[in-house]
Amino acid sequence: MTQLPDIRQLRIFIALEKTRSFTAAAGTLRITQSAVSHSMKSLESLLECQLIERLGKKCILTPYGEVFLHHAKQAVQHLEGAASKIKTLNSWGYSSLKIGVTHAQSQYVLPEALCEFYDKEKRCEVFVVTGDTPHLLEKIDKGVLDVVFGIKRSRLENEFQFREVAKDDLCFITHPDHPWVTKKPENSEDYEKERFIIYGNESLTTGILDTHLSGLGIKYRTSISINNMESIKAMVATKLGVGIVSDWTIRKEVEKGTLVKHPIQPAPVREWGYYLGRTKSLSSVEGKFIDIFSEKLQSMISGV
């Protein structure tokens, strides 16, 4: 692991750049000049380059120093901001909630859920991480996240708590001019000649889809795989291929007539819900957010 400078070294380096003097920097920081010199020698030794060039009593940054200055200022600014925020949270009795959501949920469900939650909970900060369900569950294991909203994966039932919230169906979508609009595909060859646009090759959705379509005797080739539902819809709208999406994500486009939905019979079904650590108990704030998010997800999927 790369050894990093400590914040004291960064502060001294920034003070040197500002004052252009070892003596002035020492006075500004209320430390000895020898402490400034020792800190800079240690920093340059750590980075294996010269950051400061002495010109008599003055000093200037070397090209390496100019590059490092930008990052040093950002690092100190971020750390000071974080420390200030933590102090504010502690002073006013704030709590925090760390949640993980899939990309689709972050687009279609999260904004309204957060608005309603913040209206009811003025003193809770919600930190959000997006990703595929397996990736997010790794963060529960590491203690990075408190709750993950995602798709049920049966083989994980013994590792996490899972509570189902809603179910949805997957379907094909095409441009209104696509041949499928007037003539439905009849055999595997009709599917094999199409370019399919799906959500993430390594996602749970793809695994569910592959298993289901294979059971129906449908062979398809994935030409485009992307982790963004809006991008999938945009590509289908420009006639790049046939999309495979959840039916609730294309409700508006179908109503407008910009996309056409083609049901899969029987449809691949996904179970949506939330995951918790195996031994975790919910706090009142966590329970409140879960209730709000679950209600919004149910409403979005059902269209009510």
Image (cartoon, grey):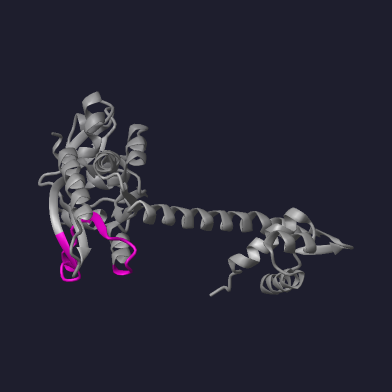
In-front residue for pair 5/89: 89
- Residue 270 in view (yes/no): yes
Q: Residue at x 24, y 58 (%)?
A: 207
Residue 80 point in image, percent of width and height: 53, 56
Above-or-below relation of 118 to 290: above
Residue at the farthest right position: 56
The one of 195 and 20 positioned closer to us in this rendering:
20
Quadrant of res 25: bottom right
Left or right: residue 169 compared with residue 207: left
Does 154 appear in magenta? yes
Report the front residue among 182 and 253: 253
Q: Going by the image, does 28 lie left or right of 58?
A: left
Question: Residue 168 appears at what percent x and percent y?
Answer: 15, 46
Tell me where the magenta segment starts and ends, as one range.
Answer: 141-162
Q: Position of residue 130 (x, y in %)?
A: 34, 52
Q: How many numbered callouts? A: 0
The residue at the point 25 percent across, 58 percent down is 147
Q: To which quarter of the image does residue 160 belong?
A: bottom left
Residue at the extreme left of the image, as rendered: 266
Residue 61 at x, y = what percent? 77, 58
Is 111 in front, or is 181?
Answer: 111
The answer, for residue 64, to whether it is visible in the render is no
> Residue at point 33% right, 32% down?
237
Image quarter of the C terminus: top left
